[in-house]
Amino acid sequence: MGLGKLKKAISSEQSTIKGAAILLAVTVFLSRILGLVRDRLLAGSFGAGTDLDIYFAAFRIPDLVFNILFAGSVVVSLLPIFAEYQQKNKNESWKIINIMINFFLISFFIFFIFFLIFTPQIISSTISEFSPSAKEATVALSRMIFISVLFFGISSILSTVLNYFNRFVAYSLAPIFYNLGIIFGIVFLVPYLGIYGAGLGVVIGSLAHLLIQLPTAIKCGFKYEPILNIKHPAIKNLFVLMLPRAIAASASQINFIIATAIAAGIGTGAISIFYLSNNLRYVPIGIIGISFATAAFPTFSKFWAEGNKEGFRRSFYSVFVQMLYLSLPIGLMFFVLRNLIVETILQSGQFGSASTEITAACLGMYFISTFAQCLVPLILRGFFSLKDTVTPTIIALAFVAISYIFSNFFVQIFQESNILVDAVRFVFKIDGAINFQVLGLVFGFNLALLSEFLLLIYFFYKKVGDFGIKDALISFVKMFTAGIIMVIGSSSALYFLINYLDPMAKKLISLPDVFYSFFNLCLTSIVAILIYLLFTIIFHCKEVDFYRDYVLRKLKIHKNEN
């Protein structure tokens, strides 16, 4: 492919929700694969120890500031307003984009100076359990990572433009380039700079995140202008919408700060275990949840802006059940494949079998909430389409409180051997001596995540009316039943592989254990997919038809083109 064709492909427009969702899902999948490579390199280079604890802790304050500066909420708040002005006055719509960029730049530099001065005090207050040398390293790394907020902020504003014009290729490539930047830092800079090399990789990746989107934004009509009119009526309206969402996004980061502080009190490596398992469970949320929600958001906004509430409800229901069909079995498979996933992806170098066992148990616990969290981005986009950012904000604040209570409670419960701990040891087949308090933290976090979903879906239903909730519940029961059968069948297949096929294979050919883990992971996944597909067909799940019809249409189009 020539350079001209490549630029054209990056700037191309996607015209349907499904087409955009699949494009986003594919690119997010690639990004998540790179994210897993990144985590494997981090785990192998540093292990679940002090350096990796420092790395994850250093992100907390920059991420919080990123959301305070509205960048975490700008796309969902700015898009409806940008869409409205594109219809009325295109010149004004571009002025709004420039005003937001300039406002962000000024705000960033104010925060940056403040953060440079008070970083030691902020870090000491959030991770008091760290040693003085660890705190000092966290301060230095956090200051470095803070620079990435600048590039991410501008990139987030430009993402609004790309979302409106359905230019999802450049938008979806940005996270891929971000992860490539971090991987570059780990591979080429860590040998010379240690953990600071990974931090510099974050800055490089964030710059790449911006640069890959900029040319397409310019092609759509963006041109930078040094204007700052915060009295513009659209800007006033935007701040009204953004303030609650910024609070909600900040609440999410505050929750992670709390989790980091709790994990720091548990012991060395607990922060690393928590974030590595959390990164693994987030893979399907990014691939399914974010992709579908991002692709559907412009359609939701246009339906509601036109007053077509019935079209809005039909569209929401359709995307909701399609996402549920994919996310429910993935969550259940976390439980079945937890050890294989962690062995294949993370176990290497400094990350040994003990770290693998506890990380796998943490990952397995996410079967409780994975399907729900995949649906949360869609529900949030539903609220944002209504220009309701207050309700999600209140729920986000409630989530922080619930998570804090649950996490602390179960950390205490899991501190000593009791019936619950013994049950977890039995269910997750934990033989060794591990720090069960980390499992308590993850268990409480899971219950809070599930609570957040239930609150969101309840108040969304109250807000928009019946979008087909009864049909969705019927579909859930069918999918869940098929999922349980899938778990039983795939667990049996995995037992056979590990206890019978593996010993035979190892006698015939000597390969590193990771190859056998990867083979078992792939084969068991295929068995699980086939079982789930078979039984959802037997149970007449309508969602199967959505994907079957889509594939048939694509095959027909491809055949006609040939």
Image (tube, grey):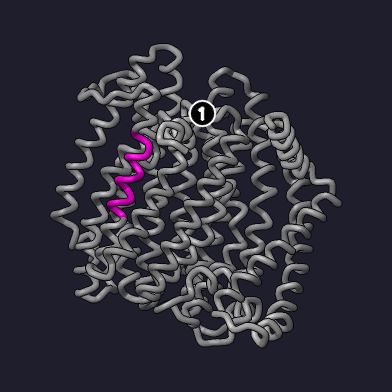
Total numbered labels: 1
Q: Is residue 402 above or below residue 107?
A: below
* Crowd class of label 1 (few under 14; some 14 to 19; many from 20; radius 10 Å): some
**Residue 377 in sight:** no
| In front of the other: 241 or 525 | 525
- Indicate the amino acid at tag 1: Glu
Residue 218: image location, x then y, percent: 34, 26
Q: Which residues are magenta?
A: 202-214
Which residue carries the number 1 mark?
Answer: 13
Residue 388 belongs to the span the image colors magenta: no
User: Seen from this angle, which residue lies furthest top?
Assistant: 88
Apparent side of residue 353 relative to residue 364 in the rendered image (left or right): left
Q: Is residue 274 above or below residue 546?
A: below
| In front of the other: 448 or 198 | 198
| In front of the other: 557 or 73 | 557
Q: Quadrant of residue 525?
A: bottom right
What secondary structure characterizes most of the magenta part?
Answer: helix
Q: Is residue 342 above or below residue 176?
A: below
Per the image, label 1 sits on a secondary structure element best described as loop
**Residue 438 in sight:** yes
User: Seen from this angle, which residue lies furthest right?
Assistant: 538
Residue 133: image location, x then y, percent: 20, 74
Residue 177: image location, x then y, percent: 39, 48
Residue drawn at x 35%, y 72% is 264
Q: Quadrant of residue 555?
A: top right
The quadrant the C terminus occupies is top right
Residue drawn at x 55%, y 30% is 14
